[in-house]
Image (cartoon, helix red, strand yellow):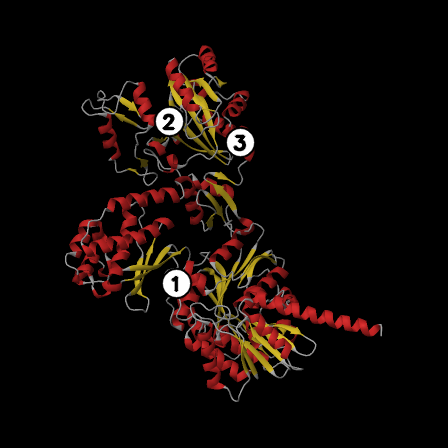
Amino acid sequence: MKIVEIKVLRGPNYWSIRRPKLIQMKLDLEELEKRPTNKIEGFRNRLEKLFPSLVEHRCSVGTRGGFFERVEEGTWMGHVIEHIALELQTVAGMDTGFGRTRGTGKEGEYFVVFSYMEEDAGVYAAKASVRIALALADDTPYNLEEDIQQLREIREDTRLGPSTGCIVDEAMKRGIPFIRLNRHSLVQLGYGIHQKRIRATIAGTTSSIGVDIACDKEETKNLLEAAEIPVPKGVIIRTEEGLKEAIDKIKYPLVLKPIDGNHGKGATTNINDWDHGVKALEAAQQYSKSVICERFIQGVDFRLLVINYKFICAALRTPAAVKGDGEHSIQWLIDQTNKDPRRGFGHEKVLTQIKVDSFTMKMLEDKGFTLETVPAKNELVLLKPTANLSTGGTSTDVTDEVHPVNIFLAERIAKIIGLDICGIDIMAPDLRTSLFENGGAVLEVNAAPGFRMHIEPSEGLPRNVAEPVIDMLFPKGSNGRIPIIAITGTNGKTTTARLTAHICKSAGYKVGFTTSDGVYIQNQMMMQGDCTGPLSSQFVLKDPTVDFAVLECARGGILKSGLAFSNCDIAVVTNVTADHLGLGGIDSLEQMAKVKSVVLETVFKHGFAILNADDDLVYAMREELDCNIAFFSMDEQNPRIKKHCEDGGIAAVYENGHVSILKGSWKIRIEKVTEIPLTFGGKAVHNIMNTLPAILSSYLFRNIKVEDIRLALQTFIPSPVQTPGRLNLFHFRHFNFLVDFAHNPAGLQLLCDFVSKLDGSPKVGIISGTGDRRDDDIRELGRISARNFDEIIIRQDKNLRGRSADEIVGLLIEGINETKPKEIPLTIIHKERDAIIHAYKNAGPGSLITIMCDVVPDALDFIKKLKEEEDQTASTISMDHRFD
């Protein structure tokens, strides 16, 4: 058994729209294909012993223990691996439960699909589940605990922390999308021009000066003291001599902490003698040369949280500690404390397990204790110098106890430092009385305060502190989104996307759009190449200048990674024809239609799916959708269109030489086809078809007017600039050159239909195939070429994709020989550039040369160079004649 490939799906995908985060593993069972689980002696018992919790997997049986019943009856190893991968993640603290196992169409090969919470953990679980299954099948020992711990560590290293995570969760509840911008805590909320950013609990709105001040404890203390905020008396020291002077001035007990430290690092509290002070100075100077020495305030540790300059909540924080029972050692007490089901590894649970570290040992040493010491009954033994939850501390919500004066002070402190999100650390006997009365003091003001103590307190009421953050960033009614039009289909996607973007730009929007030739931000190409996958879509959605997105979404990206967005406003499917079949587990047109329908299923309920009513597979997609539906058709009398409009629906049609919108019983004529350059006076029928969904999707945005659409249609000129590789016609002195991206039989047929309407004879075709297509798809390109061209040149130097050039050429020739009505001159020139030069040098007067180009920029640049050389030569000759 071996893993063939692993794909990480990060958005809506072929397997599920609502569960976008999936691992898709292609698995070859090899000899295990012949050995289902009921034929492997003892397999079920070994599996149940290793994973007793799998009893909760109901599987298709639908009852507790259902999966074990399937194993007993006999199921294939791919199915077992699916369940192991899910349970591995669950026992490691990532509870997830969606899975599918399906054959790829090849004997013994399966797609094993399962959900994940953290991407790296999902990939690890995929590989580990195969190792485990092999060990179970071979009856060899396996260290499961090692995998579980590794998954826990991956989870903690890669997931958003609890503070960032709760903000993202709150945003998602409100329909605000997010994009993680790095592997840490930098997150974009919203899209395009409406986006906001957070890094942990620092927002894009947070003052950088405020953060800088808060990170400088001396500066913070000086500002607060000047504003009559109670703070401990203290000085800055750098040497032992300075420490001695500070002790003489401030007296014991003391606190030492690095001037720019955070999270309690390097801080030592309740210092009562010189030796303790020297050690504390050494600890602090590991983080900062300058150290704050201040009076230790008696009391307990409180954290007050202020968001948008309003007090939100408060927590009492207690350092990690154990209470003696007079019988057991400190180590035993720690172990017992860590057995509390609320404690886990890292941030997986409400509380974190207590780890013995150098800080713990130092605190015990200061009291004359070791880990084997048995403390007296009810004696509290502190194990950490600070009350951080991440080191095993606890928190108790005390929001409802805070005195109004202390609330006033907290909000005033936030303003003084200039932080719209801040945590204020206070040492005081309690918060029920004013700090002015109980002798409490403000110890620190923290930028990026942790939220975990508030959202999951050990005791008291949890507080949704993410809500006021989102309220601040996105006032009520705002969801941070920009309009998204997503376009998919077999042919016509790029032209439709480009025209749609042009219409929206003409209406005043700052458009970002993706196509098969590049990513454009406001018509400026930012990335070149096939940019129809999720990374390109995300590039547009991340751009802070864009207020409208038009995204071409091709089959490859959907199958490889899923979509980059969970929802769009309008989705278009142009058509579904035979292309890319036999790739990625998609072997039929029906399966291909399902891939394309993924885009439609992301449309908001109030949005529109725009479907080709002339295509049976596309038309059938309407049945599974939960949104508004609009159609387009080249035939106004199409019964589907008539019925839809009679029911009050909306459609776009080609009628009486016009592209028009049908709205119920009303007809809105947008423009004559002869006035739309893209259609070449109506000769390019496929571009009339591409125009229909573009005008319909634009019209459905109410602030795009018919006049905007009409003007855009008139100004969208087919050229290497606006439509590279789509009917680019070059006029040479004695012949014409037509460049097009047609790369599949349906696309080539549409191109040939257009060529047949153009003047020019003979008609020469430069054709090629693509190696990863089915044999008959390549032959069909030859058949179509033979029926439509007077002369054929085959070139094949690119897109071999697993075949030899000679094999592809042979299939093209087979197709040509099947349908050629007469003997056709046939030339084979492997290199595209050589084929172009041959056609150029041998072109007869009045001929029309058509080339199927797969790398558009290369072909266009070379033909433009030939045209420039011809024009320059003609100009030189003209100048010579003038001086004769």
Give percent across and percent down for residue 616: 44, 75
The single residue placed furthest to the bottom in the displayed view is: 822
Q: Is residue 646 left or right of residue 372?
A: right
Q: Is residue 738 left or right of residue 323?
A: right
Q: Type of residue at label 1?
A: Tyr
Disc 3 or 2, which lies upstream in sequence? 3
Q: Can see residue 82?
A: yes
Which residue matches tag 3? 212
Which residue matches tag 1? 14
Q: Residue at x 51, y 35 (%)?
A: 420
Q: Residue at x 37, y 15 (%)?
A: 275
Q: Residue at x 40, y 73 (%)?
A: 589
Q: Type of residue at label 2?
A: Thr
Front residue of 172 and 778: 778
Q: Is residue 451 left or right of residue 101?
A: right
The single residue placed furthest to the right in the displayed view is: 884
How far is mark 2 from mark 1, CA to CA? 49 Å
How far is mark 3 from mark 1, CA to CA? 47 Å
